[in-house]
Image (tube, grey):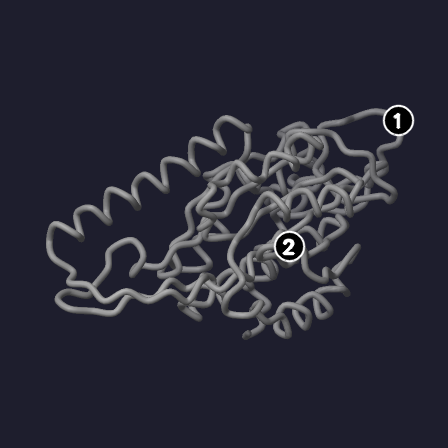
Amino acid sequence: MALFDQRFLLKLERLHFVARSVFTGHHHALSPSRKLGQGMEFADHRDYTAGDDLRQLDWNLYARAGRLFTKLYHVEEDQTVYFLLDVSASMTASPQKFDYARRLCAALGFIALANLDRVTVVPFADEVGTPIKDLRGKRQIHRLLTYLEDLTTRAAVAPTAFAPVARGFVARFRERGIAIAVSDFLDPKGPEGLDPITSARFDLTLLHLMTPDEMEPPWRGHVTLEDAETGRKKRTQLTRGLIRAYRKEWDRHLRRVRAYALRRRAFYAEVRTDADFDDVVLSSLRRSGILA
């Protein structure tokens, strides 16, 4: 997985995660915080970006430099950002999907590390895998990248099963924070299996990965279809009627995941693997409210 260039990393440093809840942390963190008052210690400046609190602009520096800068403060508490990375077999049906998912975790992980939040990555399929935990500070980005580069998917028969994963996650990680599920959400039982995470009062974000072939199958005629997670094969003919039925089922799948996010007050974003990566992170996720 190629490292990001310095220019892209500098852009990432200007972003931070939007949390719906206030979490109890352990360390000072960097934030253009709206929580003014005792315990706020000035730390640094960064270039102003749209959405920053106007009260935090440094007008004295603007008078000298002619540019807008936002003041950063040490706040009393940091937060933990958990990445639940789907490593089930369907994620590697197209290598593009799994590579894209890992790049997302790397980029978003860097944003959290740059803001002195703690980062934990939890791989999963039908159960919680071996995580990397409590990374903090930009110097940890290389550990994060190495972990993601070395991460392999489970055996080809491992299906996606959110219910045991969610139960295992909340049993193992008691400190609340932002939980970001990076997945194709191809659990036959639906995303409702994630309920234990929201019940435990984690802030949930759903990043829904999909490939162009999943959205619009390019094949026609007699084909052999194979279920990526079970290995079951079926010989069939892809007629126009069958393609129309597939599109309806795909739309139903999308509506179900979107509706779940709405019910659980979770942030949600659809991520196409043929979309420009920089635009997804720097623009799309900000429009979705996940980043600011």
Assign the C terminus to one quadrant of the image: top right
Q: As shown in the figure, which amino acid type bears the numbered disc 2?
A: Glu
Q: Quadrant of residue 145?
A: bottom right
- Which residue is depicted at the point 24% across and 49% down? 246
Q: In this view, does 207 lie to the left or right of 28?
A: left
Q: Residue 257 location, x and y as percent?
A: 44, 38
Q: Quadrant of residue 64?
A: top right
Mark number for residue 139?
Answer: none
- Which residue is depicted at the point 33% across and 67% down? 233
Q: In this view, does 56 lie to the left or right of 223?
A: right
- Which residue is depicted at the point 15% across and 68% down? 222
Q: Residue 123 location, x and y as percent?
A: 64, 59
> SS class of the residue under badge 1?
loop
Q: Residue 150 location, x and y as percent?
A: 64, 74
Q: Residue 88 location, x and y as percent?
A: 53, 61
Q: Please name whichever residue, 187 or 198, is drawn nearer the observer in this view of the structure.
A: 187
Label located before the other in sequence (1 or 2): 1
Assign the N terminus to one quadrant of the image: bottom right
Mark number for residue 38?
Answer: 1
The answer to whether 18 is drawn above or below residue 223 in the figure is: above
Crowd tier of the residue under label 2, counting other residues whose Cα lies within 10 Å: few below 14, some 14–19, many 20 or above: many
Give the CA separation, mark 1 to mark 2: 43 Å
Residue 221 seen in the current view: yes
Q: Please name whichever residue, 116 or 118, is drawn nearer the observer in this view of the structure.
A: 118
Q: In this view, does 31 lie to the left or right of 13?
A: right
What residue sits right under mark 2 in the picture?
127
